[in-house]
């Protein structure tokens, strides 16, 4: 496999991390918001298939590289065969684990190729380790924000509202220090929230929406929901939950 669309050879720890993050985002899309297409492309009658992620945050299902040795480490081979006889959730978890292993292999392949020293390898690992794994995102095992953490404490009615600074409740301004502390507490409270699509952390200046079915939170841009559109949604279902209902 070549580097895919927009391929390049990162030569610093920061460049390798950007490469890692882009590939990771693409693979998370395949296993979450792009799940319907991913399942369609995975066919047991085909030859051994692999899931690839690219630095451009895109993904593809394809046959493994023919050259030996390949230009980059190859992902798990034959993920389509493992699908038969397995529960879909368990199979997706298995694909996610192998995807995490492949991403680490690619990242540290670049590190070895360009002679990263101990400090560069440590810096790269720490940057990677600050992100949740694909497995954690796909299985929902990372800490998600509960419904009680919505801006007005309401459950369903508050989910379509944007989690932006303007959506916070107005607080009594007894003194500036108290206001500053409360804002910091709110940021800490939301800090562990992760997007169910891309896996990135919550940010105060971004619009988020929660699925009423699985209770996962998503960037509006990741699920193509705007604040204006959210105001008219009585019950929001994320792409994965919508696909489950359609198959049922």
Image (spheres, rainbow, N blue to C red):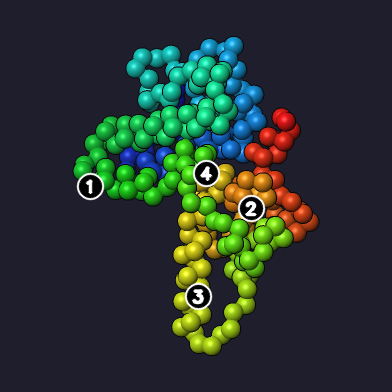
Residue under label 2, please give it. 210
Q: Earlier in the sequence, mark 2 or mark 1?
A: 1
Q: Between marks 2 and 1, how big is the CA–CA gap?
A: 40 Å
- Residue 96 image point, x, y percent: 48, 33
Crowding near the residue tagged with mark 1, few <14, some 14–19, many ≥20 C-alpha atoms within 10 Å? few
Q: Earlier in the sequence, mark 1 or mark 4?
A: 1
Residue under label 1, please give it. 119
Mark 3 and mark 2 residues within 8 Å of each other at the beta carbon:
no
Q: Between marks 1 and 3, how big is the CA–CA gap?
A: 37 Å
Q: Between marks 1 and 4, how big is the CA–CA gap?
A: 32 Å
33 to 52, vertically: above or below: below
50 to 124, vertically: above or below: above
Most distant residue in the left direction: 118
Say which quadrant the N terminus sits in: top left
Q: Residue at x 62, y 45 (%)?
A: 214
Q: Which numbered marker is on residue 140?
A: 4
Q: Of helix, strand and loop, which one carries label 4?
A: loop
Residue 37 is left or right of residue 49, and the answer is right
- Residue 18 image point, x, y percent: 42, 44
Q: Residue at x 70, y 57 (%)?
A: 156
Crowding near the residue tagged with mark 2, few <14, some 14–19, many ≥20 C-alpha atoms within 10 Å? many
Q: Earlier in the sequence, mark 4 or mark 2?
A: 4
Residue 60 is left or right of residue 122, and the answer is right
Q: Earlier in the sequence, mark 4 or mark 3?
A: 4
Q: Between marks 3 and 2, how big is the CA–CA gap?
A: 23 Å
Can residue 159 be seen here? The reply is: yes
Q: Between marks 4 and 3, how big is the CA–CA gap?
A: 28 Å
Q: Of helix, strand and loop, which one carries label 1?
A: helix
- Residue 102 image point, x, y percent: 40, 30
Residue under label 3, please give it. 182
Mark 1 and mark 4 residues within 8 Å of each other at the beta carbon:
no
Q: Of helix, strand and loop, which one carries label 3?
A: helix
């Amino acid at each position: 496999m070549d580097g895919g669309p927009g391929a390049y050879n990162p030569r610093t720890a920061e460049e390798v991390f950007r490469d890692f993050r882009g590939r990771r985002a693409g693979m998370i899309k395949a296993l979450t918001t792009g799940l319907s297409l991913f399942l369609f492309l995975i066919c047991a009658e085909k030859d051994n298939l692999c899931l690839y992620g690219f630095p451009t945050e895109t993904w593809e299902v394809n046959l493994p590289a023919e050259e030996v040795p390949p230009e980059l480490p190859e992902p798990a081979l034959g993920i389509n065969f493992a699908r038969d006889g397995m529960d879909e959730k368990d199979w997706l978890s298995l694909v996610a684990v192998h995807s995490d292993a492949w991403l680490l292999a690619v990242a540290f392949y670049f590190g070895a190729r360009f002679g990263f020293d101990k400090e560069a390898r440590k810096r790269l690992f720490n940057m990677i380790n600050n992100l949740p794994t694909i497995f954690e995102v796909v299985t929902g095992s990372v800490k998600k924000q509960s419904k009680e953490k919505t801006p007005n404490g309401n459950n369903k009615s508050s989910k379509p509202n944007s989690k932006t600074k303007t959506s916070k409740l107005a607080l009594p301004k007894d003194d500036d220090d108290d206001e500053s502390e409360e804002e910091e507490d709110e940021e800490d409270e939301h800090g562990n929230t992760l997007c169910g699509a891309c896996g990135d952390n919550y940010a105060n200046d971004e619009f988020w929406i929660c699925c009423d079915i699985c209770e996962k939170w998503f960037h509006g841009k990741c699920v193509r929901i705007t604040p204006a559109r959210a105001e008219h949604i009585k019950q929001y279902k994320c792409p994965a939950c919508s696909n489950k209902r359609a198959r049922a």
